[in-house]
Amino acid sequence: MSFVESSPAVRTRLSRTTLRPALLTAVALAFLALAAVPVHKELYTTIARAIEASPLASIVGLVAEKGPLVLVATFSVLAIRSWLHDHRALRILVAGGAGAVVAYLTSELVKLVITEPRPCRTFDVATVLECPEVGDWSWPSNHSVIAASLATACVLAAPRIIWLVAPVAVLLGFSRVGGGVHYVHDVLSGFALGVLVVTGVTVALLALVDRLYLLLPEQFVRAG
């Protein structure tokens, strides 16, 4: 079994037209999160009460609970397609997937430091979703971090897929507010964290992923 030697021909880089919008999006989301903090109670109670009393309650609850599976499935299908047809996109997905893991772990660490109580435990509001137990902190929203992370990884690898994954990620994140278990700024902060960390980790890891790619059997490399 032969192996391919190192060659700059397979070096993978993110284009500026992809990288710059991702970073600007993260910054914009962070500013929106800050802007939502002073009115966090009003935003939360208005949205949570409206959804709980509406015919959309069951749909919002379903999206809030099962929405991540749509993005996981999209990521998986894109990975399989890239494996078969586009190894450059596959290498970006590998780095982006690692970034998603880092983003999730970062979110968990931040939760342990900030320890913001869930809004459903702070305000007397009927909610679509069952309120998480005490100690399951609110800021940032893990579901939003995961949604933004997977969506960002997909977009970095295949930019045109943004029209699918971005709306799904937004719906998933805000369904957590509609379900009554998060503030708006939890969701926006989670989005910002997911986009920023995945973009940064992808850029940082692409060179390593390229080197590992060069160790693969020649048949695999040529297949892409």
Image (spheres, grey):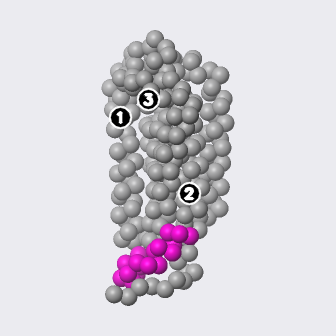
Residue 170 badge: none
Q: Position of residue 118 (x, y in %)?
A: 48, 24
Picture quarter with the N terminus: bottom left
Q: Position of residue 88 (x, y in %)?
A: 48, 70
Residues in magenta, as a range: 207-224
Residue drawn at point x = 35 percent, y = 28 percent: 61
- Which residue type carries mark 1? Glu
Residue drawn at point x = 59 percent, y = 49 percent: 196
Horizontal placement of 96 versus 19: left or right? left
Picture quarter with the C terminus: bottom left
Q: Is residue 1 magenta?
A: no
Callout 1: SS: helix
Q: CA distance from mark 2 to mark 1?
A: 27 Å
Q: CA distance from mark 3 to mark 1?
A: 16 Å
Dot 3 and dot 1 residues touching (CB under 8 Å): no
Please give the residue where the numbered disc 1 appears in the rendered image.
Answer: 65
Please give the residue where the numbered disc 2 appears in the rendered image.
Answer: 201
- Which residue type carries mark 2? Val
Q: Is residue 221 magenta?
A: yes
Identify the mark nearer the N-term, 2 or 1: 1
Q: Relative to the observer, which residue lies in front, 162 or 90?
A: 90
Residue drawn at point x = 53 percent, y = 44 percent: 106
Majority SS type along the magenta span: helix
| Mark 1, other Cα within 10 Å: few <14 / some 14–19 / many ≥20 | some
